[in-house]
Image (cartoon, rainbow, N blue to C red):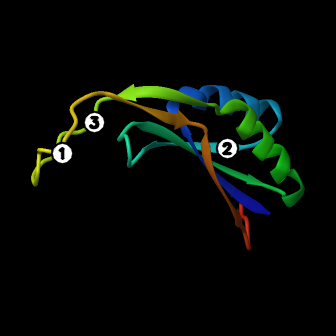
Amino acid sequence: MKLILAVVQDQDSNRLLSALVEHHFQATKLASTGGFLKSGNTTFMIGTEDIRVEKALQIIKDNCQSRDQVVAPISPMGGNADSYIPYPVEVEVGGATVFVLPIEQFFQF
């Protein structure tokens, strides 16, 4: 048995959840916040048998695309403001960060 933790952008979460349910995966959806852009993410916890891990990973890959987004940099709170560039920058966001963990025991009550 494996536990899949998938951190995805909020824009992809509903599409991913629908695809997981369609393929009979049970998932717990948690609201989370990214550290770099401080934007909303969704973390999925998916418990599945070892033989279904590849299918779950493919569903995540198919439903979580990366995209470019223009963001305004955060101004420095201290230190040297001479190197601060107040112009918006384009960064790649989205996709998924996925961890697959082994599970020793699983109980459902």
Q: Residue at x 67, y 44 (%)?
A: 27
Is residue 14 depicted above or below 83 in this figure? above
Q: How many labels, in total?
A: 3
The residue at which mark 2 appears reads as 27
Decide which of 36, 41 is in the foreground and name it: 36
Instruction: Give the number of the disc on residue 73.
Output: 3
Residue type at mark 2? Ala
> Which quadrant: the C terminus?
bottom right
Using a 10 Å C-alpha cutoff, classify the residue at mark 1 as few (fewer than 14 neighbours), some (14 to 19) or many (20 or more): few
Residue 33 at x, y percent in the picture: 41, 44
Distance from the alpha carbon under mark 3 to that under mark 1: 12 Å
Q: Residue lying farthest bottom?
A: 104
Specify whether 69 is left or right of 8: left
Task: Identify the mark nearer the N-term, 3 or 2.
Answer: 2
The residue at which mark 1 appears reads as 83
Using a 10 Å C-alpha cutoff, classify the residue at mark 3 as few (fewer than 14 neighbours), some (14 to 19) or many (20 or more): few
Q: Residue 91 occupies which quadrant of the picture? A: top left
Is residue 69 depicted above or below 61 in this figure? above
Element on which disc 1 rests = loop
Residue type at mark 1? Ser
Specify whether 92 is left or right of 47: left
